[in-house]
Image (cartoon, rainbow, N blue to C red):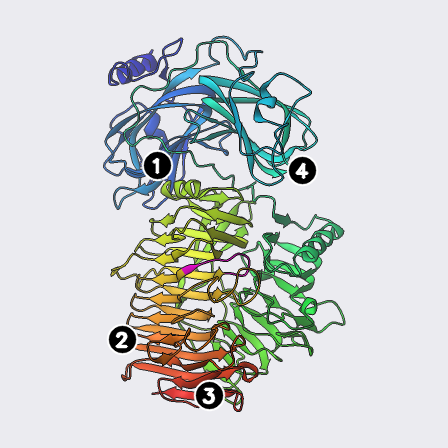
């Protein structure tokens, strides 16, 4: 009786006509039901207070983002309305979500412009659990609700799931057809001898227009031999914004009868992974509905309007897409090795192919020989590298290129411990650019890791950080290398430019012979975020804290400092995802985890929320199309972008990535934005074009290993083909770059306009392909400096810089100087080298008008300090 009275009182507060009544009047169904929340401010503000019917009690959360509160209705209900009665601590961005099981969630309402107060939301959805998922607070406090009221009805709509195929003969469209004899309409014609078949690529979809919004209770798919191994059944009222009502990554084809719950005018099968080498093919695609009149859409839309729902992430069983392989200690060794061998065979020479892979090992001990080819990442899923030990190898070889490792790019080894086989003392990491060896532990004081192919070729530039090598690092023919915050037993070797920063076991500083630059500490750095599995089996992302004046690793005999984020707060991006969907996820307050693949980006990815994490697996690649700018980050605190490659499209983009808009001036010293293993490619795979590659406008940004590359080989390369003026432009103040590689741009390769900038290790090659001197002139100056500090800058410092030329198209071309800086006491450069590779071309001066000429006669020139 009390519940009925309260329900009547609540309904009296709702405007007449606000509820889209079906055959029976919906009622308040959440009051007094079990409720849980992500946190409570204190015991005074429990989650139960939001469903107790008392306007004088409230739930209040911790003062952080995100937070949630959810109610268990006890059984599945049809939800028509949600009423939120906010205390002053409201959510400015949140979603209302439903779930059948409390783990897999579907958005039924989303906003980023909430202003609090009493919000009556007309919604359409069903589920046993209903959740308010807050992603951005409107105040400095937490989230606080006087009441969280769910209005709806239990049981099914009158009647049961019908047997009539509501899709029969209805208008149908598809993403593609294999040929005219396999049209989309054939899947809805009622004939078991005609079929729709798609093109042989992922993703593909087929959809049917039911003519009006219907309550969908069942979908039947009759697959031909070309089936989907991963797909979603989706519904939409518009044909543009889609909601998942069923999803699988383990389909085996055949006839599949799927009981579902959802409503929409359009129904779509969205295939994301094929089960065969062919396309997708359906004999029949049947849709069944309830026998009652379909629910009328709400007549009073929510204040901010609904957005395309964002797929939830199950942090214990995430869908990492078709190109990620996760192993645990129970996986047979032969199974692991077979997969590793298959990937390597495919990727050994595939530097411009589209395939991307990640191989992840849960904590434990394994026996495996991991030989990494192009666009392959291997990583452990422990909190420490020592949580995951591989007895065997994690290696990179250059036998495919005759032992020459100067093109061994784009691969990664992270967060693993390696114990070499008995009787073996040599590990090999023969790489050049964009091949990080991070957070690794090579065990054995008598062992060594070779940074070249062991006697039969060159290697050209690499990066090692947060790593412990118990034995010796042997650089061999490695031309340049940057090691940061690591612990070595010892180091042996050096060619042109070896830089050590915050490294115990570094050699003595003795530039230029041998060419060792040693910096004792790292002034300010954040290590790269990483994926791991906690002790309960939940996937999480660890975000290391910023460290000041640091040495050594973050983890060996230490507890890493930082914060941990459940993968449930990430949108897991899989191949085929559009830029619009990615932006929708960001607007909903989600972080991004890109799974391995190449993503076609046709609108700028906009990151506006402080502390957003964008993490890529398997060198996930964003191909920037239609001339848009690839990614824009607002002038906010603490954004982290890691493990992502940007590929310029064939239509010129002005900028591939921008950190902060022009004119950014806020200080982010306490919580800087950081970029980790972020790579850029213009040409090589396609004839890409971009005027500017990376522009940094925000202050205090940290760059932690980046390669900005205008292609000198591959497809779509040439002076007038893959055009690109400038690699890096820094307009912000107090920006720091660690391990900066910038190559082959056609004008200034780095332009630094901000004060207080610092660069630790710089590697550069001039463009190979100027056809003549006239084509490569900066006014009356022969060519452009690789590194230009603007004349207005008063403070800037850099250590360990190399710039090389190889003008093979026309060896008569001369570059006047590699470094161009203002002559002022606050601008200082340390340990510079220029090289004419093989004596092909000339660099006249090192910096300004100082330094010897690198040419055929004297191929290497060095300078210890300037001024």
The numbered mark at residue 278 is 4
In the image: residue 447, left or right of residue 793: right
Asked whether the residues under the numbered discs 3 and 4 touch, taking CB atoms below 8 Å apart as contact, a structural biologist would say no
In the image: residue 554, left or right of residue 279: left
Please give the residue where the numbered disc 1 appears in the rendered image: 94
421 and 166: which is toward the camera: 166
Asked whether the residues under the numbered discs 2 and 1 touch, taking CB atoms below 8 Å apart as contact, a structural biologist would say no
Which portion, as a residue range, is magenta? 683-690
Please give the residue where the numbered disc 3 appears in the rendered image: 862
Q: CA distance from mark 3 to mark 4?
A: 58 Å
Q: Is residue 687 magenta?
A: yes
Check the picture and name the quadrant holding the C terminus: bottom left
For marks 2 and 3, the one nearer the N-term is: 2
Q: Closer to the observer: label 1 or label 3? A: 3
698 and 854: which is toward the camera: 854
- Magenta-colored segment: predominant secondary structure: loop
Q: CA distance from mark 2 to mark 1?
A: 44 Å
Asked whether the residues under the numbered discs 1 and 4 touch, taking CB atoms below 8 Å apart as contact, a structural biologist would say no
Q: Position of residue 236 (x, y in %)?
A: 44, 26
Q: CA distance from mark 1 to mark 3?
A: 58 Å
Please give the residue where the numbered disc 2 appears in the rendered image: 793
Q: Closer to the observer: label 1 or label 4? A: 4
- From the viewer's perspective, is residue 666 above or below residue 267? below
């Amino acid at each position: 009786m009390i519940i009925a009275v309260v329900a009547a009182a609540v309904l009296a507060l709702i405007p007449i006509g606000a509820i889209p009544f079906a055959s029976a009047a919906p009622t308040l169904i959440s009051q007094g039901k079990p409720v849980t929340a992500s946190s409570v401010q204190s015991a005074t503000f429990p989650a139960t207070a939001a469903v107790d019917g008392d306007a004088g009690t409230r739930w209040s959360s911790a003062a952080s983002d995100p937070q949630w509160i959810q109610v268990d209705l006890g059984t599945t209900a049809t939800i028509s309305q949600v009423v939120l009665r906010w205390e002053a601590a409201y959510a400015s961005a949140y979603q209302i979500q439903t779930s059948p099981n409390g783990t897999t969630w579907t958005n039924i309402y989303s906003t980023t412009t909430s202003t609090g107060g009493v919000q009556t939301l007309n919604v359409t959805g069903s589920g046993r659990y209903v959740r308010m998922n807050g992603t951005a607070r409107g105040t400095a406090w937490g989230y606080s609700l006087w009441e969280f009221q769910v209005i709806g009805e239990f049981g099914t709509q009158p009647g049961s799931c019908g047997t009539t195929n509501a899709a029969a003969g209805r208008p149908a469209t598809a993403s593609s057809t294999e040929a005219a004899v396999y049209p989309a309409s054939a899947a809805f014609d009622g004939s078991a001898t005609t079929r729709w078949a798609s093109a042989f690529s992922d993703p593909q979809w087929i959809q049917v227009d039911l003519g009006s919004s219907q309550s969908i209770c069942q979908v039947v798919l009759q697959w031909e031999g070309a089936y989907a191994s991963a797909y979603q059944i989706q519904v939409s009222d518009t044909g543009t914004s889609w909601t998942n009502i069923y999803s699988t990554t383990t389909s085996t084809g055949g006839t599949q009868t799927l009981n579902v719950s959802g409503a929409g005018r359009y129904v779509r099968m969205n295939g994301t992974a094929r089960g065969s080498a062919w396309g997708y093919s359906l004999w029949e695609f049947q849709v069944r509905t309830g026998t009652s009149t379909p629910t009328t859409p709400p007549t009073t839309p929510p204040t901010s309007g609904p957005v395309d729902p964002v797929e939830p992430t199950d942090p214990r069983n995430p869908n990492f897409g078709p190109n990620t392989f996760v192993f645990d200690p129970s996986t047979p060794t032969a199974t692991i090795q077979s997969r590793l061998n298959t990937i390597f065979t495919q990727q050994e020479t595939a530097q411009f192919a589209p395939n991307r892979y990640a191989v992840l090992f849960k904590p434990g001990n394994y026996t495996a020989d991991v030989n990494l080819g192009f666009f392959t990442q291997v990583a452990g899923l422990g909190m420490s590298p020592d949580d995951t030990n591989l007895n065997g190898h994690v290696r990179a070889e250059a036998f495919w290129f005759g032992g020459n490792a100067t093109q061994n790019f784009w691969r990664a080894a992270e967060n693993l411990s390696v114990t070499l086989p008995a009787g073996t003392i040599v590990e090999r990491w023969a790489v050049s650019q964009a091949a990080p060896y991070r957070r690794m532990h090579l065990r054995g004081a008598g062992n060594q890791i070779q940074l070249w192919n062991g006697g039969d070729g060159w290697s050209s530039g690499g990066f090692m950080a947060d790593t412990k090598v118990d034995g010796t690092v042997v650089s061999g023919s490695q031309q340049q290398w940057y090691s940061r915050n690591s612990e070595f037993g010892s180091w042996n070797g050096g060619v042109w430019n070896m830089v050590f920063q915050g490294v115990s076991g570094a050699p003595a500083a003795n530039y230029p012979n041998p060419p060792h630059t040693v910096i004792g500490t790292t002034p300010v750095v954040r290590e790269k975020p990483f994926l791991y599995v906690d002790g309960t089996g939940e996937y999480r992302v660890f975000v290391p804290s910023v460290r000041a004046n640091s040495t050594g690793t973050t983890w060996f005999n230490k507890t890493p400092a930082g914060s941990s984020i459940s993968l449930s707060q990430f949108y897991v991006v899989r191949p085929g995802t559009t830029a619009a969907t990615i932006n929708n996820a960001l607007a909903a307050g989600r972080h991004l985890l890109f799974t391995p693949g190449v993503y076609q980006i046709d609108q700028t990815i906009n990151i506006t929320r402080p502390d957003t994490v964008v993490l890529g697996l398997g060198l996930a690649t964003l191909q920037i199309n239609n001339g848009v700018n690839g990614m824009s980050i607002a002038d906010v605190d603490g954004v982290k972008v890691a493990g992502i490659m940007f590929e310029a499209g064939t239509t010129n983009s002005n900028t591939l990535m921008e950190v902060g808009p022009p004119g950014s001036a806020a200080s982010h010293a306490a919580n800087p934005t950081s970029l980790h293993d972020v790579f850029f490619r213009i040409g090589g795979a396609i004839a890409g074009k971009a005027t500017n590659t990376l522009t940094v406008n925000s202050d205090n940004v940290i760059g932690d290993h980046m390669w900005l590359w205008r292609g000198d080989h591959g497809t779509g390369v040439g002076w007038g083909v893959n055009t690109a003026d400038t690699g890096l432009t820094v307009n912000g103040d107090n920006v720091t770059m660690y391990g900066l590689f910038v190559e082959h741009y056609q004008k200034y390769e780095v332009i630094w306009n901000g004060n207080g900038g610092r660069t630790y290790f710089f590697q550069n090659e001039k463009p190979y392909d100027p056809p003549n001197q006239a084509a490569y002139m900066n006014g009356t100056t022969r060519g452009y400096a690789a590194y230009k500090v603007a004349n207005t800058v008063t403070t800037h410092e850099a250590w360990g810089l190399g710039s090389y030329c190889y003008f093979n198209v026309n060896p008569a071309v001369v570059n006047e100087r590699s470094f161009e800086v203002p002559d002022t006491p606050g601008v200082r450069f340390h340990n510079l080298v220029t090289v004419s590779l093989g004596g092909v071309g000339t660099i006249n001066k090192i910096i300004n008008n100082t330094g010897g000429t690198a040419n055929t006669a004297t191929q290497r020139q060095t300078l210890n300090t300037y001024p």
